[in-house]
Image (cartoon, grey):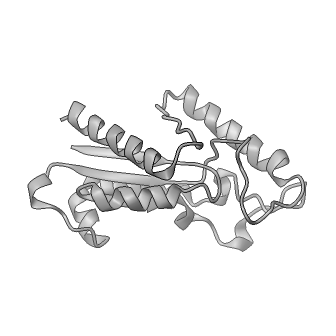
Amino acid sequence: MKCIVGIGGMTNGGKTTLTNRLLKVLPNCCVIHQDDFFKPQDQIAVGEDGFKQWDVLESLDMEAMLSTVQAWVRNPRKFARAHGVRVHPDTLDTHILILEGFLLYSYNTRSYQVPDPPGLFDGHVWPMYQKYKQEMEANGVEVVYLDGMKSREELFHQVLEDIQNSLLNNS
């Protein structure tokens, strides 16, 4: 069985931390980081507001990312080996792919050490998040929202349990 899990969230919101913890406990688990697919800086458009437009899909080489996902879908065992993931012999039929990306899920709790230039978040980042969130909902993508006020430990266990339940229900 193949299972694809998407993890999105605000900048510096713990996506990679959660992904790395899941990677350690889930069998035959591979990760694709959306950040690995940004176009070179000189190919990123500058908006009317003067900011580089990093938070739009056009800033990413989505064709390369999709191709990478398709390589996993075609042969997850080969993909895992090529990416240094040990395939567990007792779970050969289970393969998990985590897609980790930068979609934003919480406007009100966004705060981190590096402040945004004035107007960047309200004028660009948040509207792009809203646009892509609406597209996902319109396309029927099932999204599970996490409560950012919970501890990392609680969130990890919630996500792990959801993945394990999904594997059990689809096996």
Question: Residue 118 location, x and y as percent?
Answer: 90, 56
Give me the residue at 10% from left, 60% from top: 89
Question: Residue 164 location, x and y as percent?
Answer: 27, 41
Is 53 situated above or below 154?
below
Give me the residue at 24% from left, 52% from top: 95
Res 33 seen here: no
In-image side of 122 versus 41 (left or right): right
Give me the residue at 39% from left, 59% from top: 21
In-image side of 86 versus 154 (left or right): left
In-image side of 113 versus 14 (left or right): right
Question: Residue 134 location, x and y as percent?
Answer: 64, 31
Is 150 situated above or below 53?
above
Q: Residue furthest left?
A: 90
Res 96 seen here: yes
Give me the residue at 49% from left, 34% from top: 143
Q: In which quadrant is the N terminus drawn?
A: top left
Q: In which quadrant is the C terminus drawn?
A: top left
Is 33 situated above or below 155?
below
Residues 147 and 134: in front is 147
Is 166 situated above or below 56?
above
Question: Residue 136 location, x and y as percent?
Answer: 56, 34
